[in-house]
Structure formats: structure tokens, C-alpha cells
Image: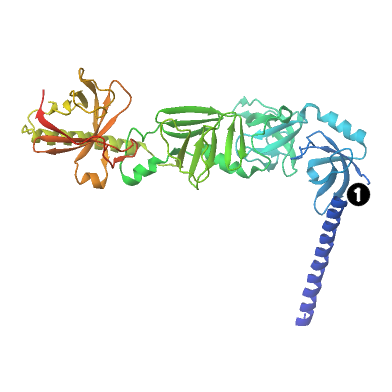
């Protein structure tokens, strides 16, 4: 073939494609004109039974509508939506089953019976729609988690077994959202009745299914976990295996565990409202906040706006979580060992400052101050504090009483910021037996004295970076007690 023949062949091929494009465009414009004018398709070709409710209209599944035109190009029917035939719209071919007479359409609706308003919702990813109602039959469609199918009929099918045990459930003939017809077994699906007026588990647009699946299967930890890890300052009261947001697909449950807050949200459906996924009937709603973070809200009166910083505190109705697959147990164990070493280091330094060296390892450290009262610390991790009459209110933990010694637990090892570590040697926390709260302090040992200042940093930050300006530094004389 010569070069000229090749050019002519390409010309004829491109000309053919051009003519086909013009024909398709003309058909599309004709169909648009039909929809706008409504005169050229006034003749009715039949009656349609709606198989899947038409979103945004009153044409629910089982409704009968007039059908005016079928387009094999756009794969749609042109239907009417009311008696005066003034409203026409296009719907996909699979959404309508067409009959020549209204009587035949009514008979079909009667055959649908109780199933005309019933849908099924896949409760896990990968469930098969099969060619016939048997577990070994060919798969014709693969369902994604929370994807809906329309029930067409309940049918007889083969039993489905796990091991030697038959699974509970029924076989249904269904219609998928792309028009595929097949059969599903209901064991891992949830029934939804449209006639109840409730919202389905997911909107018709299933683009958010992957997001919901990720939310429910990811381990989410409070944002401050990454802050503590990055600064290598772990506060074990706020860094625990128990805190986080945890999904349970089997129970349809999400648990939120935070310091001072614990609640399980048992949901029956998930809908998307703007950028929030709402877990009804609970108040819980969740949205993505970047690729590896989410914001959870459970207070309808205090929903954070997009872009608003969300920081957890006692009584808050929202919290931010980050995806974290890291094993926390070794981190927690290492921090516990570090704190034990910090306690031993403090008592060793305090004995030297008291002039006792290593003489009595089990003896308490006695701290005495006209302003602060008498504070005793034991190597076993206990403390006793008898405040003075002039001790400033709020300096000691809880509601300290000058007439009665406060007792509780002492823990060493809380981190210090770089600025504070230039002045202070370390930190300790006091947990009074009489309350659940704690108080944090920084300390420095100097020439037989223990200088103590109260922390002004919010617990949970990992490291103390400020001193409470309401109190000054208290100078305790240091000695070895019993």
C-alpha cells in the first residue's frame, strides 16, 4: 500500500468516526428537545414499574410510571412522574421494568408484594452476588461494605455452611446499583425497609464507603500520642492502651475511650451529611481531618467547624485522633522502667544532700518548710503532707487540710522542657488518696534543701514547660526521716 493509499484510508476512518459523532450528538440533542418541549414524545410506549426508588422524587420502588421513550444511546428511559404528564425525566434502563399495558404493570407490582420496599446492605467488603442461589455458583458482582442492593424476591436456595454448621439466612434475588441481577445470601447483610421512612445505611452515592470502612477498621489514638512520641516525653496517665477510638464491625459499635470519658455508640446506620459520617441513632459523627486523622464529635450543640483546631479536655464534646499501628506496650514498659530509675535517682541524690549517703535506703525523705509544711516521701512511692497554716491554697493537691496530713502516691519522672531543665533537676507528681486528681511539681536539690515549684502545664502534655505563676518557689529543708 502506497503512502497516498494510507492517507486516504486514515481519512476515510476519521470521516466515519466524525459522522458517528455527529449522529450521536444529533440524537442527544433530539432527546433533550423531547424533554424540554414534551410534544414529540407525547405518545406513550408503555408503563414502567420502578424497581429501585428514583432519588429526589416520589417514585418509590413498586410505583407505576408512564414510559415515553427508550434511548439505546444513553441507555435511559424517558418517563413521566405525575398524572398531567407535565414532568418528564431520564432514568437508567435497569431502574425500570416496562410493560405494554398498565394492567400488566399492576400484576408485576402485585408479584413484588412485601419486598417492593426492601433493600439489603452489605455488612462487610467482598460479599458476592451469584448467578444462582447457591454458594458454589459463579459470582456476577462483588459488593463493597455498606453497599445496598434492591430485593426483588425471596427465593429457595442451597444451604450455606461454615464447617458442618449451616449458617442462618435466606437467599434473595437482588438488583445492584449498576443493574446487575443475581442472588445473595443474607447472613452477613442487613435488611432495610424503605417504607419506614428511615435513612439507609449509606447514601445512594457509595463513594464514602471506603472512608467508613477505614474508620471502622483502623486503630485511632488521641492526637497527643504522636506529640509525646516526637518529644520523647511520655505521660502514662494520658498514654495508655485503653485510650482511642475503636470500631467493632461485628457489634455495629464504636467506642470512644479518653481520660475521664468512656462511651460506646451502638449504631444501626451510617449516612453522610456534608463531610461528616453520622452513626445513627447515636449523636456520634466522624469526619476525616487529613489522610491519617479524624475528628469525632458526640455533642450536637458543639460541632467543630471545618479547619477549627480540636483539642480534647474534660467535658469536651469532640476529640481528634490519629491512625497509629505502632505497638504501645514496649513504649509503656520502657517508660515505667525509666520512672522507677528516676525515683531511685531522686532518693539517692536526696540522701547525699541530707549527709546520709547510702546509709538507710528505706528511710523517708523529710521536707520541712514554714511556708509549705512537712512533706514526707518514701522510696516505696508513698507520700504524706501536713501543710502549714500559711500554705497558699491550691499549692498542695486537692483540698489539703492543715489539721490533717494528706496521704497518697508519689511518682517521679515526668519530663521537663529544655528551658526548665536548665534550672530544675526533675519533676514528680502527687496523687492524693482522697481524690482522682493529681498535681505536678518541678524540683531542684541544692545544699541540703529541696526547691519545689508547682507546674502550670496542662496534664497530658508529656513534659512540663511552664511554672504556675500563682505560687512561688517553696524552699524545703531536707533531712532523712524514719
Quarter of the image that includes the N terminus: bottom right
Give the residue displayed 87% in from the left and 43% down from the top.
86
Q: Residues within 10 Å of mark 1 (few under 14, many from 20)?
A: some
User: In this figure, which residue is indicated by the disc labeled 1?
Assistant: 41
Question: Residue 296, percent across and down?
Answer: 50, 37
> The C terminus appears in which quarter of the rendering?
top left
Secondary element at image label 1? loop
Q: Nearer the viewer, residue 435 or 356?
A: 435
Residue at 5 percent of width and 33 percent of height = 355
State the residue in front, 117 or 41.
Answer: 41
Where, by quadrant of the figure, is residue 156 drawn? Answer: top right
In front of the other: 256 or 479: 479
Query: How many numbered markers are drawn?
Result: 1
Q: Spot the residue most to the left.
A: 355
Give the image location of residue 216, x and y in percent: 53, 37
Question: Vertical placement of 203 versus 22: above or below?
Answer: above
Residue 377 visible here: no
Residue 407's quadrant in the figure? top left
Whether 379 is drawn above or below 272: the answer is above
Decide which of 2, 63 is in the foreground and name it.
63
Is residue 282 left or right of 420 when viewed as pictured? right
Residue 267 relative to residue 407: left or right: right
Looking at the image, residue 320 sits to the left or right of residue 390; the answer is: right
Amino acid at each position: 500500500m502506497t503512502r497516498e493509499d494510507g492517507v486516504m484510508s486514515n481519512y476515510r476512518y476519521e470521516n466515519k468516526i466524525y459522522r458517528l459523532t455527529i449522529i450521536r450528538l444529533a440524537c442527544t440533542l433530539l432527546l433533550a428537545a423531547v424533554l424540554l418541549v414534551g410534544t414529540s414524545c407525547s405518545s406513550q410506549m408503555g408503563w414502567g414499574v420502578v424497581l429501585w426508588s428514583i432519588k429526589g422524587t416520589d417514585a418509590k420502588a413498586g410505583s407505576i410510571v408512564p414510559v415515553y421513550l427508550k434511548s439505546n444511546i444513553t441507555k435511559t428511559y424517558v418517563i413521566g412522574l405525575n398524572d398531567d404528564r407535565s414532568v418528564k425525566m431520564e432514568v437508567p434502563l435497569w431502574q425500570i421494568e416496562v410493560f405494554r399495558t398498565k394492567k400488566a404493570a399492576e400484576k408485576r407490582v402485585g408479584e413484588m408484594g412485601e419486598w417492593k420496599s426492601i433493600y439489603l446492605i452489605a455488612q462487610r467488603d467482598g460479599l458476592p452476588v451469584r448467578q444462582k442461589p447457591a454458594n458454589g455458583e459463579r459470582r456476577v458482582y462483588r459488593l463493597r461494605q455498606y453497599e445496598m442492593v434492591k430485593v426483588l424476591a425471596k427465593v429457595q436456595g442451597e444451604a450455606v455452611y461454615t464447617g458442618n454448621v449451616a449458617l442462618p439466612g435466606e437467599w434473595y434475588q437482588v438488583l445492584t446499583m449498576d443493574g446487575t441481577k443475581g442472588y445473595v445470601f443474607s447472613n452477613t447483610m442487613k435488611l432495610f425497609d424503605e417504607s419506614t421512612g428511615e435513612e439507609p445505611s449509606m447514601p445512594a452515592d457509595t463513594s464514602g464507603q471506603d472512608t467508613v470502612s477505614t474508620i471502622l477498621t483502623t486503630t485511632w489514638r488521641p492526637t497527643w500520642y504522636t506529640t509525646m512520641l516526637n518529644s520523647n516525653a511520655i505521660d502514662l496517665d494520658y498514654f495508655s492502651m485503653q485510650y482511642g477510638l475503636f470500631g467493632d464491625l461485628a457489634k455495629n459499635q464504636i467506642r470512644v475511650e479518653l481520660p475521664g470519658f468512656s462511651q460506646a455508640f451502638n449504631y444501626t446506620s451510617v449516612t453522610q451529611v456534608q463531610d461528616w459520617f453520622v452513626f445513627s441513632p447515636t449523636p456520634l459523627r466522624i469526619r476525616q481531618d487529613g489522610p491519617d486523622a479524624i475528628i469525632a464529635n458526640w455533642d450536637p450543640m458543639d460541632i467543630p467547624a471545618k479547619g477549627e483546631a480540636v483539642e480534647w479536655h474534660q467535658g469536651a464534646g469532640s476529640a481528634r485522633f490519629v491512625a497509629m499501628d505502632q505497638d504501645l506496650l514496649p513504649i509503656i514498659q520502657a517508660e515505667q522502667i525509666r520512672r522507677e530509675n528516676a525515683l531511685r535517682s531522686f532518693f539517692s541524690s536526696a540522701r547525699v544532700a541530707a549527709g546520709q549517703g547510702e546509709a538507710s535506703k528505706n528511710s523517708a525523705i523529710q521536707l520541712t518548710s514554714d511556708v509549705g509544711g512537712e512533706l514526707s516521701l518514701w522510696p516505696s512511692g508513698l507520700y504524706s503532707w501536713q501543710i502549714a497554716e500559711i500554705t497558699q491554697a491550691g499549692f498542695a493537691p486537692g483540698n489539703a487540710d492543715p489539721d490533717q496530713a494528706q496521704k497518697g502516691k508519689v511518682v517521679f519522672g515526668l519530663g521537663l522542657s529544655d528551658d526548665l531543665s536548665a534550672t530544675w533537676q526533675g519533676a514528680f507528681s502527687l496523687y492524693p488518696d482522697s481524690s482522682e486528681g493529681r498535681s505536678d511539681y518541678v524540683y531542684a536539690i541544692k545544699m541540703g534543701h529541696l526547691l519545689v515549684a508547682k507546674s502550670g502545664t496542662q496534664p497530658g502534655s508529656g513534659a512540663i514547660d511552664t511554672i504556675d505563676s500563682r505560687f512561688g518557689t517553696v524552699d524545703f529543708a531536707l533531712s532523712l526521716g524514719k
